[in-house]
Amino acid sequence: MLCFSYLRTFLKQRRLRTLFCVQCLLDDEASVARILSVARTRISSLAAQLTTRTMSSQAVADIGLIGLAVMGQNLILNMNDKGFTVCAYNRTTSKVDDFLANEAKGTNVVGAKSIEEFVAKLKRPRKMILLVKAGPAVDAFIQQLLPHLEEGDIVIDGGNSHYPDSIRRCKELEAKGILFVGSGVSGGEEGARHGPSLMPGGSDAAWPHIKEIFQKTAAQSDGEPCCDWVGQTGAGHYVKMVHNGIEYGDMQLICEAYDILKHGLGLAESEIGDIFTKWNTGVLDSFLIEITRDILKYNDEDGTPLLTKIMDSAGQKGTGKWTAINALDLGQPVTLIGEAVFARCLSSLKGERTRASKILGGPQIKPFEGNKEQFIADLEQALYASKIVSYAQGFMLMREAAKEYDWKLNNPSIALMWRGGCIIRSVFLKDITAAFRKNPELENLLFDDFFNKAIHQAQEGWRRVVAQAILWGIPTPAFSTALAFFDGYRREQLPANLLQAQRDYFGAHTFRILPQYASAKLPEGQDIHINWTGRGGNVSASTYQA
């Protein structure tokens, strides 16, 4: 009974006597065990709070960052350069010591050896960035942080998370009084160090507290930060997903241009590199054109182009696939990104393609007898026009997502964010920014006067390139689907009337009549089913949905 007496006295001192309101529980060993468990939990919680309060005088950091891989280290150093004190933490605490002793030596960066110490070193409202592997690791760190956070603290996921996870996390944390930001970060290791493109979205109330840090840390383009508030819940990671999808499309278009120049025109890598150098001074001026030029001119130790020795099988991490799947879910014809994803899938079938090359026949590419300079100019126009279509499709998708998820996306700011610091940065994005600033409600980039004129001027060369590639037997899925989309989008009438008639014939899925042909038998605006053979009956299967 001595232990019970001690326990009673201990808990009484901490105002927990209510646990002993029923005297008989003292004679029940199971109940006592439960009481001891509750007491231990309560004492641990009190100890954690006491530790945090004790450390509160150490709150010196403007922001914290968890995850000391190269991206995390570089982003910390970038923020430090901009005048912010950053607290660094890593699950493997030896990495903190190594970072402080080497890369961060001589800076104002501070380290933490535990989550408790990490939180305690942050100024209120506490702001902390997670740069860890997307998925369960993000949730695990959030759960570790929660017991030490207060209402109004801000958790920022800067990883490559899928936007549905960000929507969920935002709602869960807001219910606990914690603000959440899911931020896309683009630019790779170099961008993180010297200025990335940052795409934050989530709890609107968080933005005023992180705006200065984010906009000073981000890349700058014409004196403007490549960072602004994107929208609510998962909008930041959604915009990053679309960015990555467009990146897939741009890369595939460039690869097809290279293929045409090499195998269609028979040019060497160095000659193609010269063409890309020229292109990078005009409307195609961009990071991806620039690095392609460098790759084409890079020689191995034996003096031959290294590019020719690299296996033609491309990998992918899945963000392009996410974009294509979401486009299908929302019913948006984002065809170029989809084809770019499938092109990578086809490239991975190296063994099958090798066997097929020995079995399946096709056109033999003959030496080009036309005007090479004109054809190269046509190819430049084809690349430019296809890029316009790719971005038009990307913004179409974001427009539909804003409706679906009730986001207020800032299209001019999104285009501005992509102008610097990210993989798809290009001068081309200045024109997109201008188009949306002129008309924030622009339905499609192709309706803007600048892009309408540009694609009109480019389309003759675009068509010649696609036609010639088909005659050569050179696959151009991105060029071809971009042109097919353009032709389909500009057509007032498509053959979908036959498609819908077929659906009604075999499945009674109904159709609607054009207004000019409406009658009492075929009324306008109603779902109509026809008994096409006289044997099928008159009952329709379901409501017609276009």
Image (tube, helix red, strand yellow):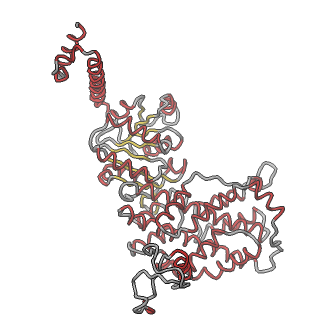
Q: Position of residue 120 (x, y in %)?
A: 33, 33
Q: Position of residue 229 (x, y in %)?
A: 37, 58
Please, which residue is most extreme toward the front here? 535
User: Is 389 or 135 nearer to us in this picture?
Assistant: 135
User: Is 28 or 326 nearer to us in this picture?
Assistant: 28
Please, which residue is most extreme toward the top here? 2
Image side of residue 447 versus residue 3, left or right: right
The residue under the point 74% across, 53% down is 311
Q: Position of residue 534 (x, y in %)?
A: 53, 85
The mark tally for this picture is 0
The residue under the point 40% across, 51% down is 214
Image side of residue 48 versus residue 468, left or right: left
User: Is 247 or 64 nearer to us in this picture?
Assistant: 247
- The N terminus: image quadrant: top left
In the displayed structure, 426 sits above or below 159; it is: below
- Give residue 456's quadrant in the image: bottom right
Image side of residue 15 versus residue 380, left or right: left
In the displayed structure, 293 sits above or below 114; it is: below
Q: Position of residue 43 (x, y in %)?
A: 27, 23
- Give residue 380's quadrant in the image: bottom right
In the displayed structure, 485 sits above or below 311; it is: below
- Give residue 225's quadrant in the image: bottom left
In the displayed structure, 72 sits above or below 342; it is: above
